[in-house]
Image (cartoon, rainbow, N blue to C red):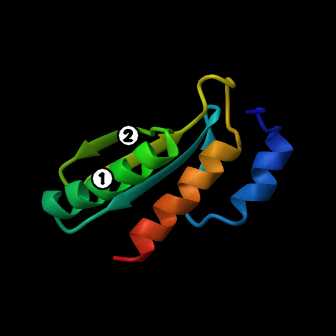
Amino acid sequence: MKKLSEQEINEKLGTLEGWSYTDNSLQTSFEFENFKEAFTLMTRIAFEAEAQDHHPDWNNVYNQLEISLSTHDAGGVTEKDFKLAKAIEGIVNAE
């Protein structure tokens, strides 16, 4: 998978709400009512990530979830990251 240029990344970011390009990765964060809601969403994302064979770097503290997407094999952001980010948006918006 080809690493996208910064210009390509910035153009594609227009299709994602709440995501940014920082530290060579796509990043977003979510806040939930409680830990159970955060963990439920993480579980749904985990199943999708496994199906895509592309796994996020993430951090969860109580009701906060931070997600970072980068294709390590390519050394940066690729189409795989945008595909997973869009799937994550679909999961979050389905709630």
**Quarter placement of the N terminus:** top right
- For the residue carrying disc 2, how many other residues have a C-alpha within 10 Å: few (<14), some (14-19), or many (20+)? some
Marks 1/2: CA distance? 9 Å
Q: Is residue 14 left or right of residue 31?
A: right
Read off the residue under disc 2. Answer: 58
- Mark 1 residue element: helix
**Quarter placement of the C terminus:** bottom left
> Seen from this angle, which residue lies furthest bottom?
94
Q: Earlier in the sequence, mark 1 or mark 2?
A: 1
For the residues bearing labels 1 and 2, Cβ distance under 8 angstroms: yes
Q: Residue at x 44, y 75 (%)?
A: 93
Q: Position of residue 94 (x, y in %)?
A: 40, 77
- For the residue carrying disc 1, how many other residues have a C-alpha within 10 Å: few (<14), some (14-19), or many (20+)? some
What number of labels is visible? Answer: 2
Q: Position of residue 51 (x, y in %)?
A: 45, 48
> Residue 42, which numbered label?
1
Q: Is residue 73 left or right of residue 66?
A: right
- The relative height of residue 51 versus residue 73 in the rendered view (above or below) is below
User: Mark 1 or mark 2: which is in front?
Assistant: 1
- The relative height of residue 81 versus residue 11 in the rendered view (above or below) is above
Q: Residue at x 35, y 51 (%)?
A: 47
Q: Residue at x 75, y 57 (%)?
A: 12
Q: Is residue 94 left or right of residue 69?
A: left
Q: Residue at x 47, y 59 (%)?
A: 88
Q: Nearer the viewer, residue 1 or 11?
A: 1
Residue type for callout 2: Trp
- The relative height of residue 25 versus residue 63 in the rendered view (above or below) is above
> Seen from this angle, which residue lies furthest front?
51
- The relative height of residue 36 versus residue 77 in the rendered view (above or below) is below
